[in-house]
Image (cartoon, rainbow, N blue to C red):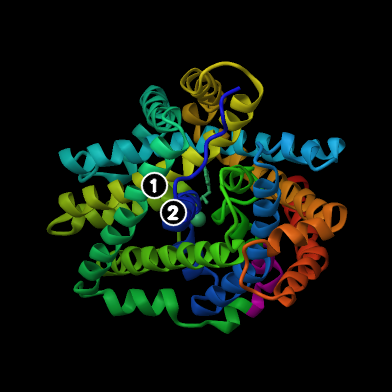
Amino acid sequence: MSERETWATRAGFILAAVGSAVGLGNIWQFPFKTAQFGGASFLLVYLIAALGIGIPAMLAEFVIGRKTNLNTIDAFEKLGYRNWRIVGAIGLATGFWILSYYSVVGGWVLRYIGGSITGAYFSDPAAYFGQVSAGPEALALHAVFMALVVGIVALGIEDGIEKATKLMVPSVVVMLVGLAAFAFTLPGASEGYAYFLSPDFGALAANFTEIVPFAVGQAFFSLSLGMGAMITYASYIDGDESLFADSVTIVVLNSFVGILAGLVVLPLLFAQGIDPNTSGAGAVFVSVATAFAELPAGQVLGFVFFVVVLIAALSSAISLLEVVVSWAVDNTSYSRPVIATGLGGVIFALGIPSAWDTAWLTWFDNLAYQLLLPLSVLGILVFAGWVFGRPALGELLKGSDFGDGVGLTWLWTARTVVIVAVVGTLLLGLQTLFV
Ligand code: PFF
Ligand code: NA
């Protein structure tokens, strides 16, 4: 077998991980949920979840990946715990599952880039979404999106993923800042900001038991945890660096992009008097498209906006394809391009029901959110905290400028509070799935 690939630089790794984290979760979900669940007060809960629970879970994945330099299944065996490969396998399956429908939504985004150029959604945004979100057209664009993902992953870690995300992540930030600056000039901007950011502790208190597990689940999804992605990306790290500093950077940038997206979307909606109180991926597409349809420079703005969303979605999707590709590269003698194409094809096929009918997409998403993700994160935490334990701590401290205190805090948080929070999230999720 040829030598395993690595990131060329530490910044390359961080940007790839940020690219994985920053995706549809930030631009679609985050602004709307924040606005509905109490604005700044929800933001606070989310930030506590992301920092207090997301960081320890991310560190657990980083430690497993960097220590072994192996894919998310074989890593467990190399550490001496063959039976725990099941945890890696659940993560890998979760990533596979999520990518199948994420790619369908990626196809919608492609469609909306085209629709902005031609103005196709301008006359009736709701009817337009109905036409393009399901059926043959959605299927074709799901294929195109998946082909783009395969193309990047086929090029490998340094020449494909690292080079691509080095370009993509800064572009997303720059374009979002530009859009936010424009949104600032709109007449409804201050109303939009108020709706997004004014703290509504009443709304938070009234729904606290629902919001906390949601904030935790959203933190996992948003940070790409429990899908094998962070284990896999960390497995390409060559040498020691402070994983703690890396994870803080990733979490901060991910939250920053979510807030930035809110500063774009909510003023846009308020300027046009559109109710942001929507639920479901589709409703979000419709409301944003309606705003563009009514704005003077809507065609250009819509184009830029959907290009941003596309780039964010692509840089996330490549991380999930890489999880399975990495496993196959480590275990078979096929070339990376052949593997990427073959596995991309299988994931495309799994996404066919979601492309055909959005009800399937919702079902796939619910199962991932409520069951697969928390289960997978729980397995990783129990493994890293209790099974692997002290050696995990040793790996974390390698290359770190932080004292043992930070490491011990990580170990004990991961072993206790974080596990309790994940179990709670899992139970509440199961309840919504099956009760
Ligand atoms: N962190 C991603 C997001 O917030 O959109 C979640 C994700 C979904 C990553 C799907 C990768 C992926 F293919
Ligand atoms: Na995210």
Find out if the beta carbon at label 2 lies less than 8 Å from the nearest ligand 2 atom.
no
* Residue 26 locus on image (x, y percent): 46, 57
The secondary structure that most of the magenta stretch takes on is helix
Q: Quadrant of residue 243?
A: bottom right
**Residue position for label 2:** 15
**One can see residue 279 in this view:** no
Q: Amino acid at mark 2?
A: Leu
Along the line of sight, the residue nearer the viewer: 358 or 117: 117
Residue 81 numbered tag: none
Apparent side of residue 389 relative to residue 346 in the rendered image (left or right):
right
| CA gap, disc 1 and disc 2 | 6 Å
**One can see residue 205 in this view:** yes
Apparent side of residue 157 relative to residue 326 in the rendered image (left or right):
left
Residue 165 numbered tag: 1
Magenta residues span: 205-213
Residue at 64 percent of width and 57 percent of height? 58
Q: Quadrant location of the N terminus?
A: top right
Element type at mark 1 = helix
